[in-house]
Image (spheres, rainbow, N blue to C red):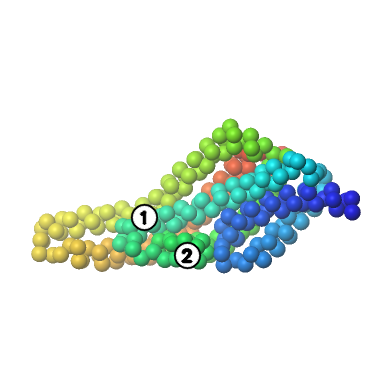
Amino acid sequence: MINVMQAFPVFLLIFCRVTSFFVVAPLISSRNVPNRFKIGLGTIVAILIYLSYGTNQEAAFDEGYILLVVREILMGLLLGFVAYMFLIAIQLAGAVLDIQMGFGMASVFDPTTGAVTPLTGQFKYMIAMLIFLSMNGHHRLLDAIVYSYNWVPLDNELFVRIYDGSVSEFFLKVLGMVMVVAFQMAAPIVVALFLTDVGLGFLAKTAPQFNIFVIGIPIKILVGLTLLLLLMPSLTYIFDHLFSLMARSMEELLGTVGERPGAGDP
């Protein structure tokens, strides 16, 4: 009984970080994934982390324990949100394309997030999730939360890093990176559609009898879908680069909050 009372506070802290990470992490946080599966997976991962890391840790149910729980929940949420931000770049790029192609009004309801998403963005998001699974991206997510204890132990200084602005500066940097990646993904088609608008403008001046507002929208949709079809093979390389940035950013977050482990650790 004494061993259980000593182990439970440590296990609860680990469980809080793992489950809060699963709440916002890509793919696992989807509404299509049952809550029982999330809780069960979080419990199994927390048990494995405790057996490999938490057996030599100590914690007590005292007046400061609630702050430890809040700190671990924040750590899990921050780590999962960093990964989720890079998937937002896909939908942001799709929103830019929809505005240019004329699909801006044809937004669809995404059951995985519970929000209205752009049509092209939802199409790319589904492809990205398939590529993410084929590249064992879910293994990367599990590695991130498991090995986070090598970087950020239970006695971390997260509140100090939030107070001195290190975490805020990091997220501003990641936000800028996400915006750049999103516009890079949309740039080829956006430039082609811009040139299409220029050509339609010349056509309107040289042949005023053509109703540009009537023929312009179908032409832009045709050009956009054709280029999207031609660029489909390159999505694998684009998403691979995106997922590499995701893993690197999660590592930078762990390095910002904690310290890089020794050479022999992951």
In this view, which residue lies farthest toward the top?
A: 164
Please rate how many residues cluster around mark 2, counting C-alpha atoms within 10 Å: few if below 14, some from 14 to 19, many from 20: some
Q: Is residue 135 visible?
A: no
Q: Residue at x 27, y 62 (%)?
A: 220
Q: What residue would you read off at disc 2?
A: 110
Q: Earlier in the sequence, mark 2 or mark 1?
A: 1
Q: Position of residue 251 (x, y in %)?
A: 61, 44
Front residue of 161/250: it is: 161
Front residue of 189/126: it is: 126
214 versus 171 height, above or below = below
Q: Residue at x 56, y 57 (%)?
A: 26
Q: Residue at x 43, y 46 (%)?
A: 180
Quadrant position of residue 168: top right
Residue type at numbered disc 1: Val
Is 17 positioned to the left or the right of 179 in the image?
Answer: right
Is 209 positioned to the left or the right of 72 in the image?
Answer: left
Q: Position of residue 102 (x, y in %)?
A: 30, 62
Residue type at numbered disc 2: Asp
Q: Quadrant of the N terminus?
A: bottom right
Q: Position of residue 27 (x, y in %)?
A: 57, 61
Front residue of 240/139: it is: 139
Q: Which mark is residue 96?
A: 1
Quadrant position of residue 25: bottom right
Is 33 positioned to the left or the right of 178 in the image?
Answer: right
Which numbered disc, 2 or 1, marks the residue closer to the eye? Answer: 2
Secondary structure beneath dot 2 equals: strand
